[in-house]
Image (cartoon, rainbow, N blue to C red):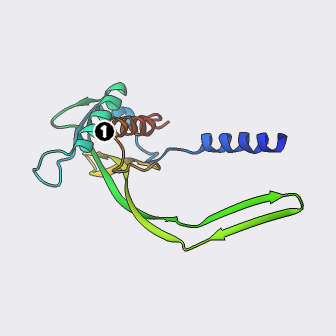
């Protein structure tokens, strides 16, 4: 029983240590110089999707909490997008164990089937408008899937954007 509890504890600790986002930034930049921001114009003049609206709202909340304000001729341009990716998930194989008095049995069945599924990774970039270079970038390591409910999508986006801007401005 004790080895099982140790394994469970180790799993919980390692899961808690995994970073939900990764950030990269230019360490030579003085981030306190940035006071205003604007969102990058979209790819087309179509209406924002639901997720894009959620992302922009979450980013606005985080930047406001960091002291930045929206503006026309802003210091920073915020570019965000959800990068579509796909992966494969296997299913169909099963393993079973059984035991009895002096007997142990193992069963294995195939075939293995693969199903492709798509998901999105949220990426946010801050671009210095004077140099037109990306000075800060964050990528979500968690997956935004189509099967999420609207409320879970909103909670997911809020959580990921909060994690992205937790250590902004970088020290």
Residue that appears at 32% across and 34% down: 58
Q: Can you see residue 34?
A: no
Q: Is residue 9 visible?
A: yes
- Secondary structure beneath dot 1 equals helix
**Residue at the far front in the pictured view:** 101
- Image location (x, y in percent) of residue 171: 50, 36
Which image quadrant for residue 3? top right
Instruction: Return the residue nearer the eye: 171 or 114.
Output: 114
- Which residue is denoted by mark 1 in the rendering? 150
Q: Nearer the viewer, residue 28 or 135?
A: 135
Q: Where in the figure is residue 85, as x and y percent of width and height?
A: 38, 61
> Where does the image place residue 36, in percent across and percent down from the top left?
25, 33
Rate crowding at label 1 as few (under 14), some (14 to 19) or many (20 or more) other CA atoms within 10 Å: few
Residue found at x 83% / y 41%: 1
Task: Give the side of residue 27 with respect to residue 57, left or right.
Answer: right
Identify the residue at horizontal 19%, vertical 32% (top origin): 71
Q: Residue furthest bottom?
A: 111
Looking at this view, is 57 or 127 the one in front? Answer: 57
- 109 left or right of 98 in image: left
């Amino acid at each position: 029983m004790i080895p099982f509890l140790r394994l469970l504890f180790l799993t919980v600790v390692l899961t808690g240590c995994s970073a939900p986002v990764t950030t990269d930034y230019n360490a030579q930049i003085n981030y306190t110089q940035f006071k205003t921001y604007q969102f990058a114009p979209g790819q087309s003049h179509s209406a924002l999707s639901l997720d894009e609206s959620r992302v922009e709202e979450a980013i606005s909340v985080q930047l406001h909490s960091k002291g930045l304000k929206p503006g026309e001729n802003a210091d920073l341009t915020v570019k965000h997008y959800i990068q579509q990716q796909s992966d494969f998930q296997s299913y169909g194989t099963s393993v079973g164990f059984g035991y009895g008095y002096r007997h142990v049995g193992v069963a294995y069945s195939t075939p293995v089937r693969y199903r492709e599924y798509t998901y999105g990774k949220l990426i946010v970039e801050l671009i210095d408008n004077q140099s037109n270079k990306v000075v800060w970038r964050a990528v979500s390591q968690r997956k935004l899937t189509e099967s999420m409910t609207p409320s879970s999508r909103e909670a997911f986006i809020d959580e990921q954007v909060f994690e992205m801007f937790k250590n902004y401005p970088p020290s």
